[in-house]
Amino acid sequence: MPNLDKLFKPASVAFIGVSADRPLVASRTYRNMKRLGYPGRLYPVHPRAESFEGDKCYPSLSALPEVPDLAFIAVGAARTEELLLECARLGVPAVEIGAAGYAEAGAEGLAREARLKAIAAEADIALCGPNNMGFINALDDVIAWPPASTVRPDKGGIAVVTQSGSIGILLSQDERKLGLAYLVTAGNETGLTAADYLAYFIEDPRVSVVLLFLEALRAPERFARAAERARELGKPVVALKVGRSEDGARAVAAHTGAIAGDAALYGAFFDAHGVMVAHELDAMQELAVLLSSYPKPPKNPHVIPITLSGGEAALLADLAGHHGVSLAPLPPALAAALQPHIPDFQRPRNPLDAFGLGWDEARVEAILTALAFDPTYGTIAIAFDAPATGAADGPYAKAVAAMCGRLKDRTDAKFVFFNNMAAGGRSEDMRSILNRHGIPVLSGMGHAFAAIGAWAARACPRPPAPAPRKLAAILRRAAEGAESLGESERFEMLRAADVPMIACEAVASAGEAVAAQRRFGCPVAMKATAPHILHKTELGLVRLGLDGADSVKAAFAELSGKVAGTTVFVQPMAGPGVELILGARTEPGFGSVIVVGLGGTYVEVFRAATLRMAPIGIEEASGILKAGAVGKILAGMRGRGPYDVDAAARAVAAFSQFAAATADLFAAIEINPLIVLPKGQGVVGVDVVFEARR
């Protein structure tokens, strides 16, 4: 494994590409490192210059008085390969390459990048880039950063990994004055990847929070291990993943040659490994502010915002669902305790308008105290307007800040302040009080709620993934002929894995079909299928509700001659229930992801589904089935239901185990529909498609 200490904490750095005549990247970075107090040795390299910035210039790397820890190569892509080969021969342990013209530049660039990758791997070089800007190690004064406007960052606990140089420049400004530990622009990640940087940063005890701006994950397995290690160390990780839209995905490919991937897949992957997600830069910044004060989640996910405006309270209620903020209702006892402080014609509710009887400091402190010592809420959010001018709610906010400071160490609840608008800045009087007590101040109602929602959700972590089941017999059978499994064999495999599937009998004649219908003793469905057929309905190969010999014979005659090479199957018709789709697909590097949503005729109408990395347990499956549109329908509505959610959860969990166990064999599996019967009657899958991996 390359030594990242040599990259981020080099004792000596060689700069290839400096020029006294032109403001090149190497020249600007050299000046910045020298100006900002780099404690090591700097070596400018130029084949013809005798000096640079008053320092001796060397004609080549080989001419240096020592082998540098880091070579900063800032020349065109055409010359970079020979310079990297020279680094390999000399034993240079770390290299930064800023040039573009690699994977993002088409076939020739891809080939050029592949050669760089091979050289770095063979020599065990910690290669940063190419197509990037460099890095900052603020903690150790290694500012390998080219912008001429670069200043020494405030030192702190925030580490940043970004696959965009421009975003790196923006975040390096540290507008919220949190203090930087590290910032690295990863570029094309020909050598080191975001996973490697994350793994390195979290092991530094000086780092408290890691922010990621990602276009794609090139090493998801390593990333998962690093994220799990961060969770073990209690260090929050926040990711902003771009490329969620079709246009965004194309922009990612044009920028670094990476494939952005499925947004829902990334969401499930991050959730599985404890990575918080931000969807815009301001929300990520506010989440960093919040985590800097409170790296641990609150005692529970429920939030109660306090405002001085009924209109703002209504707006907060509207935003809560969008940002995943849990506004649990006030318990009756707490509501009764708050009622004396609220006008008689109002009832206290969440969010809470604390201005109903006019401003009264003692009354507001009584409200805060009641909330702070009630176990219902993990977070008390103070939503005031306290701009930098000190106007609006500024005096009130200052008083409430002092109240929260007095209460903070006496309660498990977390206090968070935010201005409803970001544009006016923040009151310095309020901030100075809150800073003394370690209470964060966020900017903007929407950004604050996005941050609070992501942070508070960590109070209910994802249940630990169950150990994968050993499905040895099933795996042996699948491996013998994954592409040739017949319909009944697929059903049998799933039943063996504890996924309830309806009976399925192959028939070779009309007489056998009639006999099967009689044995089932109920109306039947008949299907013609073959291993190469994925969608039977689209080919007209399904007949439903057949009851009686004549209809069964007619269906057999029609189906058996419709498509060559098919086998006809007979199944009993399932009872009425809610139709779900239950699918799985194998994503290289990520693993198996399952999809649960409304199925049958609902699939195209609602397009509502939940993704999770497999396997999952019954508890998590139950949570999926009780949420959103699926949960409302399964709970029963308009005289129908309730339905058997417990049986459905067992089936989903068992299916996830099967999907995880067979990920090397099947690219995709889909049960559609899985019918959830009325409560107490179970579930049954009536159709399944397997797609073998190529």
Image (cartoon, helix red, strand yellow):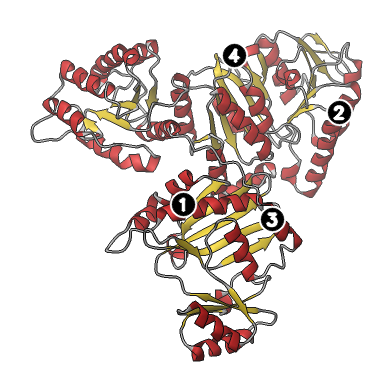
Mark 1–mark 2 distance (CA, rounded to whole Å): 51 Å
Task: Give me the disc on residue 473.
Answer: 3
On the rendered structure, is 596 left or right of 198? left
Q: Residues within 10 Å of mark 4 (few under 14, many from 20)?
A: some
Which of the 4 quarters of the picture holds residue 168?
top right
Q: Secondary structure at mark 4?
A: loop
Which of the 4 quarters of the picture holds residue 376?
top left
Q: Please state which of the two labelled residues, at mark 3 or mark 2, is closer to the viewer.
A: 3
Q: Please state which of the two labelled residues, at mark 1 or mark 4, is closer to the viewer.
A: 1
Q: Secondary structure at mark 1?
A: helix
Task: Give me the disc on residue 123.
Answer: 2
Q: From the image, tell me which residue sits under label 1.
A: 649
Q: Is residue 55 above or below residue 275?
A: above
Which of the 4 quarters of the picture holds residue 314?
top left
Mark 4–mark 3 distance (CA, rounded to whole Å): 62 Å
Residue type at mark 3: give it: Ala
- x, y percentage for residue 420? 32, 30
Q: Is residue 675 above or below residue 112?
A: below
